[in-house]
Image (spheres, rainbow, N blue to C red):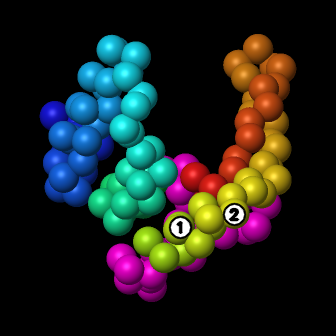
Amino acid sequence: MSMQMRYAEYYDMVKTFDELYLASQENRTDGIDLYSIITSSSNILLAYRTIKSNAGSNTAGVDKKTIKHFKGFTDKEIVEHVRRRLANYKPQTVRRVEIPKLDGSKRPLGIPTISDR
């Protein structure tokens, strides 16, 4: 079982994700309030935990913040921060870096801010 699946179970989101998947398979969108699901405490904390476990969370975006910025936040503060950001969401500029490839060329990589992740 993957870590993300365990996290989803811990935050009791598996049933929600299963229901959303089934509805999408049946082309049903009526009665589904995605915004409420997205802004639920469980979903926000699941996203935070998933991002925190990703090695990329230590890479700063244009705001120069990493996951460490949220280290002292309580769960309630994280949820409130995300909800405030989503109320009038406008993504910040993405930091662009060039990643060298084996053949000597480079590929562009966009790094969003930690809050946008």
Please say if 10 is above or below 24: below
Q: Residue 78, located in which quarter of the rendered image? A: bottom left
| Cα gap from disc 2 to disc 1, whole angstroms | 11 Å
Amino acid, disc 1: Val
Front label number (2 vs 1): 2
Please say if 12 is above or below 5: below
Q: Residue 106, located in which quarter of the rendered image? A: top right
Give whichever of 96, 20 is nearer the camera.
20
Side of 98 relative to 114 (left or right): right
Question: Residue, x 62% and y 65% (percent of image)?
Answer: 87
- For the N terminus, the quadrant is top left
- Queried whether the magenta region covers residue 48, the answer comes back as no
Side of 14 relative to 99 (left or right): left
Question: Residue, x 53% and y 67% (percent of image)?
Answer: 82
Residue 47 x/y as whole percent: 41, 54
Amino acid, disc 2: Asn
Give whichever of 35, 53 is nearer the camera.
35
